[in-house]
Each structure stands twice: as C-alpha cells, then as structure tokens.
Amino acid sequence: MIGGVVMDAQKSLVVVGAQWGDEGKGKVIDYLSGEADLVARFQGGDNAGHTVVYGANIFKLHHVPSGILNSGTICLLGNGMVINPLVLIKELEELEKRGIKTTNLRISGKAHLIMAYHQALDDENEKSLGDKKIGTTGRGIGPAYADKVLRRGIRAGDMISPDRFQACLSEVLPLQNRILREIYGHPGYDLIELTDLYRPALERLGPLVTDVALLLSEQLTGGKKVLFEGAQGALLDIDHGTYPYVTSSSTVAAAAASGTGLGPHHLKNVLGVVKAYATRVGEGPFPSEDSSEAGDQLRERGNEYGTTTGRPRRCGWFDAVIARYAARINGLTGLAVTKLDVLSGMELLKMAVSYRCREKDTVNFPLSLEELAQCTPVYETFPGWDEDISRVRSQKDLPAAARQFLNALEEKAGVKIELISVGPDRTQTIIMPNSHLEAWISNKS
Ligand code: IMP
C-alpha cells in the first residue's frame, strides 16, 4: 500500500501561480496537459482567464482547463470551484464552434454556482467600498463563496433538473432580493425569469455532473497521470495573500486535495509558475511595482492586459521575497519561469532580493499589510541582453546575461527552475534536464 501511494503521488502534478495570478499558467498547463490523462481545476471560477496560443488559434478560457485542447484529456471542475453556468455554456459553445471536442468535461456536483445575484452583489459591494474597493473581476466570486460558507449556496448537483433548481432558488432568492433591494436599491430578480434564464445551462451542464472525487481517486489508483490546475496566485490566496486585496479561495497547492476531494498524500510534485518580472491587477500592495517608463515598457512588450477584464496590469520587477514565500506556503518542488523573452532588449534588469523593514533587511514576506507598508524592496541589478531568445530550446543556448539572471532568480527564490518559457506557443518551452518535471513528463501512465 505504501508503495502504491508513492506511485500514485508520482503521477500527480500541481501547477500553481506563485505571484499575483496571470503568471502564464495557461500556457504551461496547456503544454503539460498533453502529458496528463486528466486535468482538474480545484478553486476559483471565471475570474481566471487563461490565454492559450495553439498554432494560429488563440483561446481564452475561464472555467475550462486548458487540457480541453487535447482531445484525449479528461477535464474536471472540482468541488472547490465556483461555476457560472451561463458563462460556462458560452465557453463550451465557443470551443465547439472552433472544432474542439468538449465531451471530456465533468463537473463536481459539490461545486457551487455563481448566480446572477452574486454578480450584482459583487458590483454593489465594490461600489460601496469607494476608494477602498478590492478591484475584483466583477464575476461574483466573493459573494458565491460567501454563500457557500453561509450554507445557502446552490450547487452544480442542483442542476440535474429544472424542478430541483427552481426549488433551491425559491429558498434562497427572497433573502438575496431583500439584501439587493433594501441595502443597495437594486431591483432584484424574479424567480420564474431566473429559472428560465438558466434552463439552457441546466440542460447542457446537468448531464456533466459527476462524483469528481471518486473518479479522480480511481484514476490515480489505476496509475493515470493527473495535472491539478491552479488559478490566480499565492499572493491572492484568501489566507496567505495580501488580505483583503485577495480572491475568495485558497489558491495554494494544498487546496488541490480539498478542492477535488482527495487526500494530501496524492500530491507530490508542485510546480510554481512565475513571470520573469511581476504584474498585478486590481488594488493592493505591490512592493516591486515600477510606475516609471520601465513598467510601461514591460506592459507593452508583455501585452499585460487582463484576459478576463481587459484592464491594464500594474507592472514591476521579479520579487524573490515573494517567490520564497510562495515556495514555502505551497511546498514548491520546482519553478516555471515564463515570459523570459519579454525581457530581451531591456538595458538593465532589476530583481527585489530582500525587503528593508524598519532599518532591518529581511528575506521573509511580512505578516501584515501594516508591516508590509513599512518595507521597501532592496534591488539587485543585472545586465540585459539584446538577442531574440524566442527560438532557443535549451537553457545552455540562452545568452550569458539571461543565464545569470535565471541563476540569481533560482538562488534567491530557493527553488530549482524546471521549465522556462520563451514565447506563447507550446513549442517555445525549455524543460530542464534531470528535473522533477522531466521525470513526471517521462513517467508514462
Ligand atoms: P475576484 O477574484 O474577482 O474577487 O477579485 C479579487 C482580486 O483578485 C482582484 O484584485 C482581482 O484582480 C484578482 N484576481 C482574480 N482572479 C485573477 C486572475 O485570474 N488573475 C489575476 N488576478 C486575479
């Protein structure tokens, strides 16, 4: 049995964001999902936006794992997710229109639904916060998770028939309407109209509802390879992020277990994705933000505009304090560094290597926002390189300056680099020899 557990664990790979989301996880997951039998999401909802470039096609995915582009991969939406049924059916329609098979998608009956009133509440909450707004994606994520915790959510399993769905809605809608009308002056929702609005989604999605936890456990025990796809990033985690400027789910690797219904022993390899620089959307602290011309350069070169909202992303430098922190709270076994090609042509590169907090240097991320506000990053600078690296396929063929930058990144973060991405296409990927990741890729099911 112990041997069996170890073997199962070798078959799983958790991929998480190790900054503020938008690290390029979509590309990394799309690349790796070709090696997986199953890809499972375990938290978040359509606040996530993965841009995947596949040949001449660009796909923008919000709920559906990037693995859907591989016709043999089973894609799962786990119980830790919140799902907007209206958005999900559109996403599936769009994929099907472009010839992508979606029959391999399954939804946990325990995942919670994001309803129209959650989106309205998200908007109203943000408006009422004024200057203190979180800068959410406006997708209703926080209110949907709040209702889950308050034990008044509607779950994917309630979509199996219109009668059941309407019965659930009729229980929760009066209170939601009272909140919307009495606190925010919003007109609220009509029960019959809302049921009718969701009817096509129930028809399309109801048959996909499955016991995802059971399916995953059977598949792992049967020796299948599973990729767990994280959304957002470590610093947006509800507990470990820069609260309250965070999302409403647990974004760290451990959530892959609770968010799909598996025990933690199934998880072994944890790949943290970082950009070679840093970005953040929404409000909240961002110590290595660069509001000068260099930040603008990074935004334009890296096309740093939100996939979900189109908002320009705040840009800055790679922050090794954050990478170290993300490594610790996730138990990272390796790093994937994305968008290295974006740095080509920058004269000088900066990296935050420690924080100066009340006249002391630290490499540990502070406990509270108050402490963080008293810290300034300490930078090291590195020479840039001019070469176009988008065709490089081996780490040793990178310019010396790029290797120097990556060596420092790895050393300061305290985690080995296992994957380097030098462009958006699948082929623009370097896997480090003798890494955990290489072993996972070659470990056939
Ligand atoms: P929410 O998840 O929509 O509630 O937004 C909360 C915070 O998380 C905001 O700062 C969002 O910009 C941020 N956020 C949520 N999802 C993502 C993502 O996929 N990438 C980057 N930031 C995100």
Image (cartoon, grey):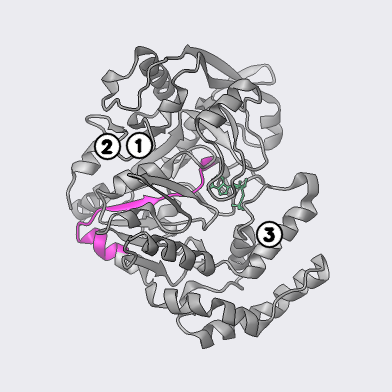
State how far apart marks 3 and 2 are (Cα). Answer: 41 Å
- Residue at 42% of width from left, 18% of height from top? 405
State how far apart marks 1 and 2 are (Cα). Answer: 7 Å
What amino acid type is highlighted by mark number 1?
Thr
Q: Is residue 21 above or below residue 148?
A: above
**Pointer 2 local density, CA inside 10 Å: few below 14, some 14–19, many at least 20:** many
What amino acid type is highlighted by mark number 3?
Asp
The verdict on label 3 being within 8 Å of ligand 1 is yes
The magenta span reads 216-234
Q: Which residue is mark 2?
A: 436
**Pointer 1 local density, CA inside 10 Å: few below 14, some 14–19, many at least 20:** many
Which one is closest to the eye, mark 3 or mark 2? 3
Dot 2 falls on a residue whose secondary structure is helix
Dot 3 falls on a residue whose secondary structure is helix
- Residue at 40% of width from left, 46% of height from top? 52
Res 333 label? 1
Q: Which residue is mark 3?
A: 122
Dot 1 falls on a residue whose secondary structure is loop
- Residue at 29% of width from left, 63% of height from top? 217
Residue 218 is left or right of residue 368, and the answer is: left
Q: Position of residue 66 (x, y in %)?
A: 38, 52
Q: Is residue 295 above or below residue 284?
A: above
Q: Is residue 168 above or below residue 410?
A: below
Q: Position of residue 90 (x, y in %)?
A: 48, 65
